[in-house]
Structure formats: structure tokens, C-alpha cells
Amino acid sequence: MRTKDKIVHTSIEVFNELGYSNARLQIIADRLNISVGNLAYHFNTKDEIIKKVYQVVSDELTEILSTFRTKPTLEDLDEQIDKFFCFIEKYPFYFVDIVEIQRLHPELHQQRLDYMERMIIQMKSRLEYHVTRGVIRPEEFKGHFNQLANDISILVTFWPAYCLAIESNNKSLQRFKSAIWAMVIPLLTKKGKEEYERSVLKIETM
């Protein structure tokens, strides 16, 4: 691995552990067993590092969002929830340090907002698609699906901060998935509930 890539990887670890504001170049350099001067040869400032880190994070998030409706069942949503959880586990600082990044790097914050908007649009599209399949009931009021998609986006975005705030040791994938599905399940039709049990819970039906 190139030194520059090692710096980015180690910086992510430090940001996750200490938070962006507490991470210093000296700490990152010490973790790498290199001098600050050597680190500065590749990245002059922490601002340069965070921009590169966001590029790495954005590439992964783009890949997650590109896996859209790869399966014609509710399992498609369940698998993307899995991917979001893995992303959260890998980059908790990306969610916990939202306000700090917004203040210091508004252009990076705007990038985040763009991804959130794409996530909301995709979720709304998913719900509408499953209505045509007869597994989800139509909107109860105008803008219902857009509101639900926004609420799911909020849950994904603030899940790490929530767990940190309540010092929860229960950060399991199942708890995360249950929180999201709890918002979707009430919309399922009889056919939808059967498909949910079969394709998501993997319960064999007779």
C-alpha cells in the first residue's frame, strides 16, 4: 500500500476513534511511525486529508446507492439496509461529526446532502414500485412516501450519534434493521407480509 493510501486509511481510524476535531497530524503520523514532515509531504494540512477521506467515503456510498432494485422483492431493501449498516460501522465519524464538518467544510457537507437526497428519492421510488406489485399499500396522504423516505434517511444518518449518546452496547445489525423495518411493515399488504416473512425473515411457508 502506498504511503498516501496508508495515511488516508490511518486518518479514518483516528477520526473514528477521536473525532475529526480532536485528530491532529502528529497523532496520525505517530500511528504510522513517520514524521509529521513526511506526512506533510503528502498532505499539508488536515483539511487536505479530510477531502481525500471524503472522496474514499463517497466512492463507497455511491456504490451502495448504485445497487438499486437489483431484486424484484422486499429482499432488495433488506440487503441495502445491510450495506448501510456496514458503511456506518466503517465510517462512524462521517455521521457523528456532521456539524463539525458542516462548519469547517460546507462543500463536503453539501456533498453529504446530495447523497441523502438521492437516498430519499430511491426509497420513495422503491415504495411506489412495491405498490405496483401489490405488496405495499398506496400512500395514505399526499407526500406520505416522501416523508417516510426522509424519516428512514434521518434514522440512518443519526444512528451512530444516537448509540453514542445513550452509550448503547447494543449496536447490532438486527436492531438497526428492526428500527427501519418498523416504519415499513405497517404499510405491507397481506401479500407483502407473506413476502417479508419469506424473503427477508427467511421463514418457509407451507
Image (spheres, rainbow, N blue to C red):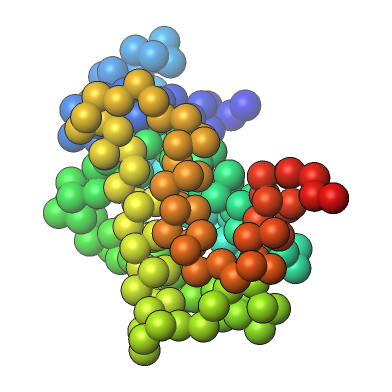
| 75 vs 159: above or below | below
| 179 vs 74: above or below | above
Q: Which residue is pictured at 60% across the width and 70% down the height?
A: 189
Q: Which residue is pictured at 39% across the width and 69% down the height?
A: 148
Of 13 and 180, which appears nearest the observer?
180
Please provide percent x and percent y for residue 82.
Answer: 58, 44
Farthest residue toward the left? 103
Residue 7 shows in the view = no
Please provide percent x and percent y for residue 147.
Answer: 34, 74
Please provide percent x and percent y for residue 59.
Answer: 55, 53
Q: Is residue 4 left or right of residue 206?
A: left
Instruction: Write down the quadrant of residue 144 in the picture.
Output: bottom left
Quadrant, the N terminus: top right
Please provide percent x and percent y for residue 71.
Answer: 75, 63
Farthest residue toward the bottom? 142
Q: Is residue 53 left or right of residue 78?
A: left
Q: Which residue is pictured at 73% across the width and 52% down the height?
A: 199
Report how many numbered discs are placed on residues in the image.
0
Of 178 and 39, which appears nearest the observer?
178
Q: Is residue 65 left or right of residue 73?
A: left
Residue 187 shows in the view = yes
Q: Which residue is pictured at 42% across the width and 59% down the height?
A: 183
Instruction: Write down the quadrant of residue 44 in the picture.
Output: top left
Of 181 and 169, which appears nearest the observer?
181
Q: Is residue 132 left or right of residue 118?
A: right
Farthest residue toward the right? 206
| 24 vs 62: above or below | above
